[in-house]
Amino acid sequence: MAGYVVRRLLTAVPVLFGVTLITFLLMHFTAGNYVPGLQLDPNLKPSDIARIRANLGLDRPLVVQYLDWIGIGALFKAVGLAGVLGGSHNIDPGILEGNFGRSLIDGSPVLASVLGRLPNTLELTATAIVVGLALAVPVGVVSALRRGSRLDQFLTAASVAGFAVPQFWLGLLLILLFSVEFHAWGLPWLPSSGAVSPLGGGGVVDRLQHLALPATVLAFFYLSSWSRFVRSSMIETLSQDYVRTARAKGMSERRTVYVHALRNAVAPLVTLIGLELPGLVSGALVVEVVFGWPGIGLLAFQRALQYDYTTVMGITTFAAVLVVLGNLLADVLYAVIDPRVRYS
Amino acid sequence: MASLPAGSVRPGRGFWRESWDELRSNRAGMASAAVLCLLVAIALAAPAVSAVVTHYGPTQQDLGHAFEGPSRLHWLGTDELGRDTLTRLVYGARVSLGVGFLTVAIALTVGAAVGLLSGYYVGLLDDVLMRVVDVVLSVPPVFLYILMSILFRPNAITLAVIIASIGWAGLARLVRSEVLSLRSRDFIVATRSLGARDARLILRHVLPNALPVMIVAASLGLGQVVLIEAALDFLGLGIQAPTPSWGDMLSNAQVYFVHSTWLVVLPGSLIFLTVLAANVLGNAVRDAFDPRLRRF
């Protein structure tokens, strides 16, 4: 087991390097080296531009800039090789030092902004996963038990259709119905934006009301794909020999299905949920924008509109690191659940 | 062995022919294919539709007649600037389908090439390429799309390249696993022992057998790309105004949807329809290629 974890960690390290390298190169070769438009300022002499670039540490070799960006400087300093990277008077972040950069707009540290919004995003996606799961299992089981019936055909068609619905469209339609129309019809209506009400909000009920619509949109997608999986898994489980044995031994249908078959049918669902772990942080961006949900996705979007390259890049890198760690966590969980995985 | 009743056995007609027959008998799949063909035809004929059918350009404004409902002049009404909705929807099809097909083409080409090479020449090349694939698949696509679209100004072609720059990785993995299972099959081993060179083996023997997987992935991928592209347009980070696109129309309609609901319903329905058709067709093609599902 320890060997498996070590091997997984070893493969994760080059991936992390690659991910940070991609964002670094993307930024470096396109955005004018963090100072977009500098070359276009007519008041700056070429020597001024050169001096500014030197101050920002942009005239060092590319490799050195990259290493400094990921914060190897911290390691070098720790072993006493501080002078190697040529000074640290620059705005480049050191990721290993926890610095993901500063915003071009207001200089605020990216990591602080991200961590401030992270709980909101997690609240949204975690709720969506739970709701999606809670609905997908019954729907899938009912479909499997009444296989081939009109209900099954309808549910399967609904799942296929659900997969094709654009999230932003569904969000707008739900807002139209539950926020606008319900309000017009005098029914209790749901708020359409934000996580809490601006005045007097923050209570559990208030938060739940705001969470309802965005979580529904997200959960819809999970529901569509997972219910089909539960259905096919359940069908396969019900054809197993041990189910037939249980029935032959006189066990009630209810017990056979709900106590024995269900447990085994749902177990592989863990794999599917594990696949969603990496996307936990980034998957809700469109929903956050439509509903004004103050999460990481909305932050990235708003900064992007302001051309705040560094923040968007910092968020991308942070999310990518989370994805790699999420994959790592999922792999370790599989190894815990299924011992055969440890030898791959 | 008892003799089988007459007529219960028929000669095989070859894998591709039989797959095609299976697909043709799948009514949902054929309907989806028809829908997609219709959408493509409309998209290609957009200028003709604009000139002959609706007599409006996609960006032609008529501020005196904004927010009108369906009428004889404007079959699907007008939007907030008095532009004809039907014409804009037709031109929007060009964008969505154009970017969609182009992206799938690029991603499939690159992904299949990487997958074929990686799966065939296992070893160091495979390790390196798969690490690259891991890296590409680790970056959350949404953030990368946003980053790339503020770095480059996207037009249709750049947008297709941007989306394909992530999409190829999943296809590469898929093709690679198919090639890995193919390379140890008898016919490959036999052909190699007859002296066939690598290039010939890959192109003439491995690739055609990996095609079914690629075709299914392409069809399902088309649906995904249309959704992604529409979402980017909706966020304002894809095709820029004034070029009409379905996502952009939806984004504009957001502000006015309380009183002009059809402006929200129409573009969204078309996106939904396109993606649904692509998904159903993809599933139908996958079932058609599966020999275990053949109905004899």
Image (cartoon, coloured by chain):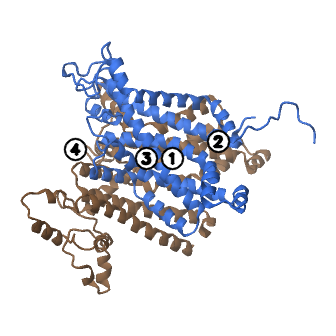
Chain colours: A brown, B blue
Q: First in sequence, mark 4 or 1: give its number.
A: 1
Q: What residue sits right under mark 2 in the picture?
A: B289
Quadrant in the rendering for residue A45: bottom left
For discs 4 and 2, the disc positioned in front in the rendered view: 2
- Identity, as a three-letter code, of the amino acid under mark 1: Leu
Pointers 4 and 1 within a single chain: yes
Residue B158 in the image, given as x and y percentages of width and height = 34, 47
Pointers 1 and 2 within a single chain: no
Q: What residue sits right under mark 4 in the picture?
A: A198
Q: What residue sits right under mark 1 in the picture?
A: A133
**Residue under the point 16% across and 72% down:** A55
Pointers 4 and 2 within a single chain: no
For discs 4 and 1, the disc positioned in front in the rendered view: 1
Residue A325 in the image, given as x and y percentages of width and height = 43, 64
State the residue lying farthest toward the bottom: A80
Q: What residue sits right under mark 3 in the picture?
A: A128
- Identity, as a three-letter code, of the amino acid under mark 3: Ala
Q: Dividing the image into 4 quarters, which one contains the C terminus of chain A?
A: bottom right
State the residue lying farthest toward the top: B72
Quadrant in the rendering for residue B59: top left
Residue A61 in the image, given as x and y percentages of width and height = 27, 73
**Residue under the point 24% across and 48% down:** A305
Q: CA distance from mark 4 to mark 2?
A: 56 Å
Q: CA distance from mark 1 to mark 2?
A: 31 Å
Residue B29 in the image, given as x and y percentages of width and height = 58, 32
Toward the viewer: A119 or B295? Answer: B295
Q: First in sequence, mark 1 or 3: give its number.
A: 3
